[in-house]
Amino acid sequence: MRTLTVALGDRAYPIHIGQDLLGQPELILPHLKTRRVAIVSNDVVAPLYLERLQSGLEAHGVAVTPVVLPDGEANKNWQTLNQVFDSLLGTRCERSTTLIALGGGVVGDMGGFAAASYQRGMPFIQVPTTLLAQVDSSVGGKTAINHPLGKNMIGAFYQPRLVLADTSTLNTLPPRELAAGVAEVIKYGLIRDPEFLLWLEANIERLMARDPEALAFAIERSCRNKAEVVAIDETEQGERALLNLGHTFGHAIETGMGYGQWLHGEAVAAGTMMAAELSRRLGWLGPSDVARIEALFQRVGLPVTGPVLGVERYLELMAHDKKVEAGRLRLVLLRKPGQAVLWGDASAADITAAIEARCA
């Protein structure tokens, strides 16, 4: 097991990464306020892993309330979130009850938002079961639901007490979901870790083959990068925004196509290529840099062009981005591979050209 710490003073918390951690309830017990938990999962993950987590906790005298939600990004909304509140209230969960999110990014985001809101805050633990959640969404305290006008527009910053990343759960992850997670792994190399980017170029096939050693290294390196950024800028006032490379374009794709049609990592890959194209037009990246990024995504099987929504539709959806400030769209772009920058001075003509160049 590898352990990292997200350094947030008296709210610091560990990230445990390793195999078969779901069978080690002693890793969770010290982080419970009382011996009562609610486990929020979905109807895909729960049949695979809920019983194992629940029985292990119950064997140590912990009372467990399971909450099983419908799977999918299309269900990341108020209606599904209310199912969590209905279960918590119906079973008389208290403010001291710990909510454990068992699943991918959707479960983690909704579980975290529920924990932040229920009785104005209850303890929260992340147990991510997808690669994307293990390397990104489970770390850092971003919680949210979607709105028809924009992804993750309603939520809160609310840190967990523990992140327990059991890499064994990746064995049941569909190949498409695995590839989507690798998109977020590549992101860390592109924005701030050029050595990791070189490692990925040499080892990407090992990741796709689910080599345990390669996966453990990539997850730890990704989490270390994110933990460092979150410790510096918890509520995304500056540097943390750089973690959103490709996300402004990507969220427009997810919203415009209908939530769940494109996986988040697929949209981020296509969005990153739009950001790379815009960076080239600004004179920061050369054609070989753009080709290098494109080749890495293609080796994973990720899309390198976005859907044809129409430039006006892209711009309309991007206007709802959380990085918009004083009406000005700010984008995460690349000065070079391994160095990202938040930029608000790209012209409408260059943004339009970048979108058009990278639409299928």
Image (spheres, rainbow, N blue to C red):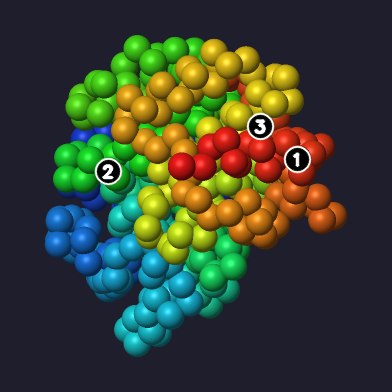
Q: Is residue 2 visible?
A: no
Mark 2 or mark 1: whose residue is earlier in sequence? 2
Residue 347 in sight from this viewpoint: yes
**Residue under the point 63% across and 36% down:** 354
Depth check: give the residue in front, 189 or 221. Answer: 189
Residue 124 appears in which quarter of the rendering? bottom left
Q: Is residue 92 above or below residue 354?
A: below
Q: Residues within 10 Å of mark 3 (few under 14, many from 20)?
A: many
Instruction: Tell me the kind of residue under disc 2.
Output: Arg
Q: Position of residue 82 (x, y in %)?
A: 43, 80
Q: Quadrant of the N terminus?
A: top left
Residue type at mark 3 is: Leu
Q: In the rendered image of this protein, does residue 88 appear above or below residue 128?
A: below
Q: Which residue is mark 2?
A: 176
The residue at which mark 3 appears reads as 278
Residue 65 in the image: x percent, y percent?
A: 27, 73
Q: Nearer the viewer, mark 2 or mark 1?
A: 1
Q: Quadrant of residue 238?
A: top right
Residue at image position (58%, 63%) is 150
Name the kind of residue labelled 1 in the image: Ala
User: Residue at the spot x=32%, y=29% of the render?
Assistant: 300
Residue tagged 1: 349
Q: Position of residue 194 (x, y in %)?
A: 53, 15
Q: Are marks 3 and 1 in contact (CB under 8 Å)?
A: no
Label of residue 122 in the image = none
Q: Mark 2 packing: few (<14 Cα in 10 Å), some, or many (20+)?
A: some
Is label 1 in a helix, a strand or a loop?
helix
| Residue placed most toward the observer, 86 or 314 | 314
From the top left corner, tell me how far across and down residue 21 is, in percent: 23, 42
Give the structural element (helix, strand or loop) at label 3.
helix
Q: Which callout, 3 or 1, points at the residue further toward the start of the chain?
A: 3
